[in-house]
Image (cartoon, helix red, strand yellow):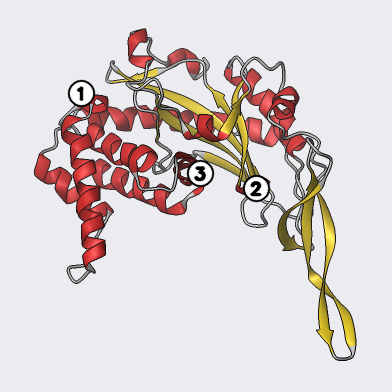
Amino acid sequence: MSYASTLIAGPANLLAPVEPSRRSAWAQLGTDVTGTGSAQQALVTAGLAGWRIRKVPMSGSDISRDGVTTIDNPEKVMLVYTDPATGATRYLSTVGTKYGVHQNEAGAAVLDTLVAESGARGTGYAGQLEGGRKTFVTIELPTTMYVDGHDAIQLHLVVFNSHDGETAFRVMIVPFRPFCANQLPVAIANHVSCVSIRHTSKSEINTEEIRSKLGLLYDYGTAFESEAKKLIRTEMTNREFDDLIREVWPVKANASARTLNNARRRNDLLTGLWTSAETQAHIRGTRWAAFQAVTEYLDHFAPAKNIEVRANRVLVSEDVAKRKQAAYDLLAA
């Protein structure tokens, strides 16, 4: 029996977000590639195909009274790519000489396998972050789960590639609450939520290896639903929510006036989401609602220069991920 077939059907009206204009971070930063016939076509549509990423030797120039001396760097190379829109060569990052390049197309076979294996209709969004140093493609699994029978959660497989010398090629499963466009990527003990392949000189993106681990990712989805049910069935008081905020965002007693003012504004927003937001209406007063309030703040209300900057943080910031995990761990304890 496939994972999708074990999920519970539910009322369709719970799938609509409260604010039609609110979109996920994937939608804000990526291109809608639904309807493309294959992963390769999705990459083309999103401008991620044909980059021909390659290594270029690094050197520098030392200018002195004796003239200009060119100095080679034997330990580092530049990664550059061909801009498919203009044909121009553009800089990506600086990496070690043994760095293994994985072209964006290298993940296409993995994507098509994931789509076929999961029963999804195809890919959802594809895009790039940090000037192309990171790329992503999402796949929405075909059936929605309903926590305790009524709170809708979708599961998305997200494929991240990177060209930054730091991040691995990853396939992740990310729970997503469409009612408020919250991403809920948290670790659950003894369950695998991510498969990674490092960029080494001998590494390859092995489709069969990833395919063999899909069952572990789907097991995570089942475990997430079980844990979410516990949270939604556990009541929580306003005082307990205040304690949660202080644990997730600790502030020293001798903090500066600016820090204290920022904390007050943050706490007011969080409390408003907890007590009054329409997105928590049918789960209000539960630990599940507390987790959603914290996540909604991080995903949609945390101060940022613009919504794109905030969306980028949602996808790549370690601080955002750690605060979501901290909130979950405290609530699930």
Tell me the number on the disc at residue 281.
1
Mark 2–mark 1 distance (CA, rounded to whole Å): 39 Å
Name the image quarter holding residue 83. top right
Binning the other alpha carbons within 10 Å of mark 1 as few (below 14), some (14 to 19) or many (20 upward) gives few
Q: Whole-percent x and y of residue 140?
A: 53, 22
Residue 142 x %, y %: 51, 16
Q: Earlier in the sequence, mark 3 or mark 2?
A: 2
Residue plotted at (58% across, 20% down): 118
Label 3's element?
A: helix
Which image quarter holds the C terminus? Answer: top left
Q: Earlier in the sequence, mark 3 or mark 1?
A: 1
* Residue 10 in view in this figure: no
Say whether marks 3 and 2 touch (CB < 8 Å). no
Q: Which residue is mark 3?
A: 312
Contact between labelled residues 1 and 2, with CB atoms less than 8 Å apart? no
Which is more N-terminal, label 1 or label 2?
2
Query: How many numbered marks are there?
Result: 3
Q: Is residue 60 left or right of residue 35?
A: right
Q: Is residue 96 left or right of residue 266?
A: right
Of the two numbered discs 2 and 1 in the rendering, the one whose residue sits closer to the viewer = 2
**Is residue 273 among the parts visible in the rendering?**
yes
Q: Is residue 61 above or below residue 146?
A: below
For this rendering, which residue is in front, 139 or 9? 139
Q: Which residue is mark 2?
A: 131
| Secondary structure state at the residue bearing disc 1 | helix
Q: Residues within 10 Å of mark 2 (few under 14, many from 20)?
A: few
Q: Nearer the viewer, mark 3 or mark 1?
A: 3
Q: Amino acid at mark 3?
A: Asn
Q: Residues within 10 Å of mark 3 (few under 14, many from 20)?
A: some
